[in-house]
Image (cartoon, grey):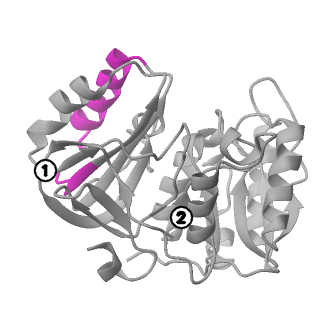
Amino acid sequence: MPEAPRRLRPGDTVALVAPAGPVDPVRLERGGAVLEALGLRVVYGASVRAREGYLAGPDAERAADLQAAWCDPGVAAVICARGGYGVTRLLGLLDWDAMAAAGPKILLGSSDVTALHRAFADRLGLATLFGPMPACATISDPEGPEPVTFACLRQALFEGGTPAPITGDRVIVPGRAEGRLTGGNLALLAALCGTPYAMRGEGRIVLLEDVTEEPYRIDRMVTQLLQAGCLDGAAGIVLGSWVDCGDPLPVLAERLSPLGVPVLAGLPVGHGSPQLSMWLETNVAIVTESCPASGAFRDSDAAT
Protein backbone atom coordinates (compact mmCIF):
# COMPACT_ATOMS: atom_id res chain seq x y z
CA MET A 1 0.00 0.00 0.00
CA PRO A 2 1.45 3.43 -0.91
CA GLU A 3 2.55 5.62 1.97
CA ALA A 4 0.30 8.50 2.99
CA PRO A 5 2.25 11.66 3.84
CA ARG A 6 1.55 13.67 6.96
CA ARG A 7 -1.14 16.24 6.40
CA LEU A 8 -0.47 19.91 7.03
CA ARG A 9 -0.56 21.93 10.24
CA PRO A 10 -0.64 25.72 10.59
CA GLY A 11 2.93 27.00 10.42
CA ASP A 12 4.08 24.40 7.90
CA THR A 13 6.07 25.52 4.86
CA VAL A 14 4.76 24.76 1.39
CA ALA A 15 6.67 25.30 -1.86
CA LEU A 16 5.03 26.53 -5.06
CA VAL A 17 6.65 25.27 -8.26
CA ALA A 18 5.76 25.44 -11.96
CA PRO A 19 6.60 22.11 -13.61
CA ALA A 20 4.43 22.68 -16.69
CA GLY A 21 3.11 25.85 -18.36
CA PRO A 22 4.00 29.48 -17.57
CA VAL A 23 2.21 31.00 -14.59
CA ASP A 24 0.25 34.24 -14.48
CA PRO A 25 2.19 36.23 -11.83
CA VAL A 26 -0.93 38.00 -10.56
CA ARG A 27 -2.75 34.72 -10.06
CA LEU A 28 0.35 33.23 -8.44
CA GLU A 29 0.45 36.07 -5.92
CA ARG A 30 -3.25 35.71 -5.15
CA GLY A 31 -2.97 31.94 -4.77
CA GLY A 32 0.03 32.29 -2.47
CA ALA A 33 -1.91 34.75 -0.33
CA VAL A 34 -4.78 32.26 -0.05
CA LEU A 35 -2.38 29.63 1.27
CA GLU A 36 -0.78 32.10 3.69
CA ALA A 37 -4.23 32.94 5.04
CA LEU A 38 -4.50 29.27 6.04
CA GLY A 39 -1.52 29.79 8.34
CA LEU A 40 1.04 28.31 5.96
CA ARG A 41 4.45 29.71 5.10
CA VAL A 42 4.77 29.90 1.32
CA VAL A 43 8.09 29.73 -0.54
CA TYR A 44 8.52 29.90 -4.29
CA GLY A 45 10.67 27.90 -6.67
CA ALA A 46 13.49 29.88 -8.25
CA SER A 47 11.99 29.64 -11.73
CA VAL A 48 8.29 29.62 -10.84
CA ARG A 49 7.78 32.89 -12.75
CA ALA A 50 9.92 31.90 -15.74
CA ARG A 51 8.53 31.64 -19.25
CA GLU A 52 9.90 29.91 -22.33
CA GLY A 53 7.18 29.68 -24.97
CA TYR A 54 4.49 27.33 -23.69
CA LEU A 55 6.70 26.18 -20.79
CA ALA A 56 7.55 27.73 -17.42
CA GLY A 57 11.22 27.91 -18.28
CA PRO A 58 13.73 25.29 -19.50
CA ASP A 59 13.18 21.66 -18.56
CA ALA A 60 16.31 21.53 -16.41
CA GLU A 61 15.22 24.54 -14.36
CA ARG A 62 11.70 23.24 -13.82
CA ALA A 63 13.02 19.84 -12.78
CA ALA A 64 15.58 21.44 -10.45
CA ASP A 65 12.88 23.53 -8.76
CA LEU A 66 10.68 20.50 -8.22
CA GLN A 67 13.50 18.35 -6.88
CA ALA A 68 14.90 21.08 -4.64
CA ALA A 69 11.49 21.67 -3.08
CA TRP A 70 10.90 17.96 -2.59
CA CYS A 71 14.30 17.36 -1.04
CA ASP A 72 14.12 20.37 1.31
CA PRO A 73 13.47 18.93 4.79
CA GLY A 74 11.72 22.15 5.80
CA VAL A 75 9.02 21.81 3.12
CA ALA A 76 5.90 19.85 4.07
CA ALA A 77 4.11 20.07 0.71
CA VAL A 78 5.03 20.75 -2.90
CA ILE A 79 2.19 22.50 -4.69
CA CYS A 80 2.10 22.88 -8.45
CA ALA A 81 1.03 26.39 -9.42
CA ARG A 82 -0.79 25.34 -12.59
CA GLY A 83 -0.92 22.71 -15.33
CA GLY A 84 -0.64 23.28 -19.05
CA TYR A 85 2.02 21.11 -20.67
CA GLY A 86 5.53 20.00 -19.88
CA VAL A 87 5.53 17.61 -16.92
CA THR A 88 6.24 14.51 -18.98
CA ARG A 89 9.46 16.17 -20.16
CA LEU A 90 10.74 16.22 -16.57
CA LEU A 91 10.28 12.58 -15.59
CA GLY A 92 13.67 11.49 -16.92
CA LEU A 93 15.48 14.45 -15.36
CA LEU A 94 14.56 13.84 -11.71
CA ASP A 95 16.87 12.03 -9.29
CA TRP A 96 14.35 9.54 -7.98
CA ASP A 97 16.78 8.05 -5.45
CA ALA A 98 17.36 11.46 -3.88
CA MET A 99 13.65 12.17 -3.84
CA ALA A 100 12.89 8.82 -2.23
CA ALA A 101 15.52 9.52 0.43
CA ALA A 102 13.81 12.84 1.23
CA GLY A 103 10.86 10.95 2.66
CA PRO A 104 7.13 11.44 2.16
CA LYS A 105 5.40 14.80 1.83
CA ILE A 106 2.36 16.13 0.01
CA LEU A 107 2.24 16.66 -3.74
CA LEU A 108 -0.78 18.70 -4.92
CA GLY A 109 -1.80 19.35 -8.52
CA SER A 110 -4.03 18.21 -11.37
CA SER A 111 -4.37 18.32 -15.16
CA ASP A 112 -0.82 17.95 -16.61
CA VAL A 113 0.41 17.12 -13.10
CA THR A 114 -1.24 13.72 -13.64
CA ALA A 115 2.18 12.67 -14.97
CA LEU A 116 3.76 13.44 -11.59
CA HIS A 117 1.00 11.62 -9.74
CA ARG A 118 1.70 8.51 -11.79
CA ALA A 119 5.48 8.79 -11.39
CA PHE A 120 5.31 9.49 -7.66
CA ALA A 121 3.08 6.46 -7.15
CA ASP A 122 5.39 4.17 -9.09
CA ARG A 123 8.81 5.54 -8.13
CA LEU A 124 8.17 6.84 -4.59
CA GLY A 125 5.23 4.72 -3.47
CA LEU A 126 3.26 7.75 -2.32
CA ALA A 127 -0.35 8.83 -2.14
CA THR A 128 -0.73 12.25 -3.77
CA LEU A 129 -3.49 14.86 -3.89
CA PHE A 130 -5.35 15.51 -7.15
CA GLY A 131 -6.91 18.94 -6.71
CA PRO A 132 -7.04 22.64 -7.53
CA MET A 133 -3.87 24.65 -8.04
CA PRO A 134 -3.20 28.12 -6.59
CA ALA A 135 -2.67 30.01 -9.86
CA CYS A 136 -5.89 28.66 -11.41
CA ALA A 137 -9.36 30.18 -11.39
CA THR A 138 -11.01 28.26 -8.54
CA ILE A 139 -8.36 29.49 -6.09
CA SER A 140 -7.03 32.76 -7.54
CA ASP A 141 -10.00 34.58 -9.08
CA PRO A 142 -10.17 38.23 -7.95
CA GLU A 143 -13.26 37.60 -5.82
CA GLY A 144 -11.46 34.86 -3.91
CA PRO A 145 -11.50 31.06 -3.94
CA GLU A 146 -14.61 29.21 -5.02
CA PRO A 147 -16.11 28.24 -1.63
CA VAL A 148 -16.90 24.55 -2.21
CA THR A 149 -13.54 23.95 -3.89
CA PHE A 150 -11.66 25.73 -1.12
CA ALA A 151 -13.49 23.95 1.71
CA CYS A 152 -12.77 20.54 0.19
CA LEU A 153 -9.12 21.39 -0.41
CA ARG A 154 -8.68 22.56 3.17
CA GLN A 155 -10.25 19.40 4.53
CA ALA A 156 -8.02 17.26 2.32
CA LEU A 157 -4.79 19.11 3.14
CA PHE A 158 -4.94 19.63 6.90
CA GLU A 159 -4.70 17.25 9.82
CA GLY A 160 -8.09 16.37 11.25
CA GLY A 161 -9.88 17.17 8.01
CA THR A 162 -12.51 14.77 6.72
CA PRO A 163 -13.67 15.62 3.19
CA ALA A 164 -17.29 14.81 2.50
CA PRO A 165 -18.07 12.05 -0.01
CA ILE A 166 -17.90 13.28 -3.60
CA THR A 167 -21.20 12.70 -5.35
CA GLY A 168 -21.74 11.87 -9.01
CA ASP A 169 -24.93 12.67 -10.89
CA ARG A 170 -25.22 9.82 -13.40
CA VAL A 171 -24.85 6.07 -13.03
CA ILE A 172 -23.64 4.54 -16.29
CA VAL A 173 -23.15 1.03 -14.88
CA PRO A 174 -24.61 0.35 -11.41
CA GLY A 175 -22.87 -1.54 -8.66
CA ARG A 176 -20.47 -1.34 -5.74
CA ALA A 177 -16.69 -1.44 -5.92
CA GLU A 178 -13.70 -0.76 -3.71
CA GLY A 179 -10.04 -0.28 -4.49
CA ARG A 180 -7.18 2.18 -4.60
CA LEU A 181 -7.84 5.28 -6.66
CA THR A 182 -5.66 5.89 -9.70
CA GLY A 183 -5.89 7.88 -12.91
CA GLY A 184 -6.45 11.57 -13.51
CA ASN A 185 -6.42 13.54 -16.76
CA LEU A 186 -7.28 11.32 -19.72
CA ALA A 187 -4.92 13.00 -22.21
CA LEU A 188 -1.97 12.50 -19.86
CA LEU A 189 -2.89 8.90 -19.12
CA ALA A 190 -3.00 8.23 -22.86
CA ALA A 191 0.33 10.01 -23.34
CA LEU A 192 1.92 7.78 -20.69
CA CYS A 193 0.97 4.57 -22.50
CA GLY A 194 4.13 2.73 -23.50
CA THR A 195 6.22 4.50 -20.84
CA PRO A 196 7.39 3.23 -17.43
CA TYR A 197 4.66 5.38 -15.87
CA ALA A 198 1.67 3.92 -17.71
CA MET A 199 -1.41 3.44 -15.55
CA ARG A 200 -2.30 -0.07 -14.42
CA GLY A 201 -5.96 -0.32 -13.51
CA GLU A 202 -6.07 -3.85 -12.15
CA GLY A 203 -8.00 -3.89 -8.89
CA ARG A 204 -8.25 -0.09 -8.92
CA ILE A 205 -10.94 2.54 -9.13
CA VAL A 206 -9.90 4.62 -12.15
CA LEU A 207 -10.57 8.37 -12.31
CA LEU A 208 -10.86 9.92 -15.79
CA GLU A 209 -11.47 13.57 -16.68
CA ASP A 210 -10.47 16.12 -19.31
CA VAL A 211 -11.04 19.59 -20.76
CA THR A 212 -11.49 21.01 -24.29
CA GLU A 213 -11.43 17.61 -25.99
CA GLU A 214 -14.03 16.66 -28.63
CA PRO A 215 -15.90 13.38 -28.06
CA TYR A 216 -14.04 11.68 -30.94
CA ARG A 217 -10.71 12.55 -29.29
CA ILE A 218 -11.98 11.19 -25.97
CA ASP A 219 -13.02 8.04 -27.83
CA ARG A 220 -9.50 7.75 -29.29
CA MET A 221 -7.77 8.18 -25.93
CA VAL A 222 -10.04 5.77 -24.06
CA THR A 223 -9.57 3.27 -26.88
CA GLN A 224 -5.80 3.68 -26.47
CA LEU A 225 -6.07 2.90 -22.74
CA LEU A 226 -8.20 -0.15 -23.52
CA GLN A 227 -5.88 -1.46 -26.23
CA ALA A 228 -2.80 -0.85 -24.07
CA GLY A 229 -4.33 -2.90 -21.25
CA CYS A 230 -4.37 0.03 -18.85
CA LEU A 231 -7.97 -0.68 -17.84
CA ASP A 232 -7.64 -4.47 -17.63
CA GLY A 233 -9.04 -5.74 -14.34
CA ALA A 234 -10.21 -2.32 -13.14
CA ALA A 235 -12.65 -2.57 -10.24
CA GLY A 236 -14.63 0.53 -11.23
CA ILE A 237 -14.54 3.84 -13.09
CA VAL A 238 -15.37 7.34 -11.86
CA LEU A 239 -15.74 10.11 -14.42
CA GLY A 240 -14.94 13.67 -13.41
CA SER A 241 -15.57 16.91 -15.30
CA TRP A 242 -15.54 17.25 -19.09
CA VAL A 243 -15.47 21.03 -19.48
CA ASP A 244 -15.86 22.24 -23.08
CA CYS A 245 -15.92 18.64 -24.34
CA GLY A 246 -19.39 18.64 -25.88
CA ASP A 247 -21.30 15.60 -24.63
CA PRO A 248 -18.75 12.80 -24.18
CA LEU A 249 -20.92 10.57 -21.97
CA PRO A 250 -22.44 8.53 -24.83
CA VAL A 251 -19.01 7.52 -26.14
CA LEU A 252 -17.65 7.01 -22.62
CA ALA A 253 -20.60 4.73 -21.85
CA GLU A 254 -20.10 2.83 -25.11
CA ARG A 255 -16.38 2.26 -24.52
CA LEU A 256 -16.43 1.64 -20.75
CA SER A 257 -19.65 -0.32 -20.16
CA PRO A 258 -18.24 -3.54 -21.69
CA LEU A 259 -15.70 -3.66 -18.85
CA GLY A 260 -18.60 -4.89 -16.70
CA VAL A 261 -17.66 -2.80 -13.66
CA PRO A 262 -19.48 0.11 -11.94
CA VAL A 263 -19.13 3.39 -13.82
CA LEU A 264 -20.20 6.61 -12.08
CA ALA A 265 -20.18 9.97 -13.90
CA GLY A 266 -20.56 13.63 -13.03
CA LEU A 267 -18.05 14.02 -10.22
CA PRO A 268 -16.89 17.66 -9.89
CA VAL A 269 -13.22 16.66 -10.09
CA GLY A 270 -10.62 17.76 -12.62
CA HIS A 271 -11.52 21.07 -14.25
CA GLY A 272 -14.39 23.50 -13.95
CA SER A 273 -16.01 24.81 -10.79
CA PRO A 274 -16.31 23.53 -8.16
CA GLN A 275 -13.14 21.45 -8.39
CA LEU A 276 -12.96 18.95 -5.57
CA SER A 277 -9.87 17.18 -4.24
CA MET A 278 -9.23 13.43 -4.19
CA TRP A 279 -6.28 11.53 -2.72
CA LEU A 280 -4.86 9.18 -5.34
CA GLU A 281 -3.45 5.82 -4.22
CA THR A 282 -5.83 5.68 -1.25
CA ASN A 283 -8.78 3.36 -0.80
CA VAL A 284 -12.11 4.53 -2.20
CA ALA A 285 -15.53 3.04 -2.77
CA ILE A 286 -18.20 3.44 -5.42
CA VAL A 287 -21.75 2.94 -4.17
CA THR A 288 -24.13 3.78 -6.99
CA GLU A 289 -27.27 3.42 -4.90
CA SER A 290 -26.52 6.89 -3.51
CA CYS A 291 -23.89 7.91 -6.08
CA PRO A 292 -20.88 8.66 -3.86
CA ALA A 293 -17.25 8.02 -4.63
CA SER A 294 -15.58 8.83 -1.35
CA GLY A 295 -11.86 8.77 -0.64
CA ALA A 296 -10.14 7.85 2.58
CA PHE A 297 -6.81 9.46 3.41
CA ARG A 298 -5.61 6.72 5.75
CA ASP A 299 -8.49 4.53 6.90
CA SER A 300 -9.97 2.35 4.17
CA ASP A 301 -13.06 1.84 6.34
CA ALA A 302 -13.88 5.52 5.79
CA ALA A 303 -14.44 4.82 2.10
CA THR A 304 -17.30 2.37 2.56
Would you call the spot at circle 1 few (<14 residues within 10 Å), some (14-19), or many (20 or more)?
many
The reply, left or right, for residue 74 in relation to residue 108 is: right
Q: Is residue 13 above or below residue 193?
A: below
* Residue sitting at x 79%, y 34%: 22
Q: Which residue is mark 1?
A: 261
Whether residues under marks 1 and 2 lie with C-beta atoms below 8 angstroms apart, the answer is no
Quadrant of the rendered image containing residue 156? bottom right
Q: Which badge, 1 or 2, is on the more N-terminal residue? A: 2
* Residue sitting at x 16%, y 54%: 233
How far is mark 1 from mark 2, CA to CA? 25 Å
Q: Looking at this view, is 50 or 156 the one in front? A: 156
Is residue 65 shown to the viewer in this render?
Answer: no
Would you call the spot at circle 2 few (<14 residues within 10 Å), some (14-19), or many (20 or more)?
many
Q: Is residue 289 above or below residue 258?
A: below
Count of numbered circles in the view: 2
Look at the image and tell me in which quarter the C terminus lies.
bottom left
Spot occupied by residue 227 in the image (x, y as percentages of width and height): 22, 33
Q: Which residue is mark 2?
A: 128
Spot occupied by residue 106 in the image (x, y as percentages of width and height): 63, 69
The reply, left or right, for residue 247 in relation to residue 7 is: left
Spot occupied by residue 292 in the image (x, y as percentages of width and height): 30, 59
Is residue 64 shown to the viewer in this render?
Answer: yes
The reply, left or right, for residue 295 in relation to residue 66 is: left
Amino acid bearing label 2: Thr
* Residue sitting at x 13%, y 50%: 261
Spot occupied by residue 194 in the image (x, y as percentages of width and height): 38, 39
Q: Which residues are magenta?
A: 214-237
Q: Does residue 225 belong to the magenta stretch?
A: yes
Quadrant of the rendered image containing residue 13? bottom right
Amino acid bearing label 1: Val
Look at the image and tell me in which quarter the N terminus lies.
bottom left
* Residue sitting at x 86%, y 65%: 42
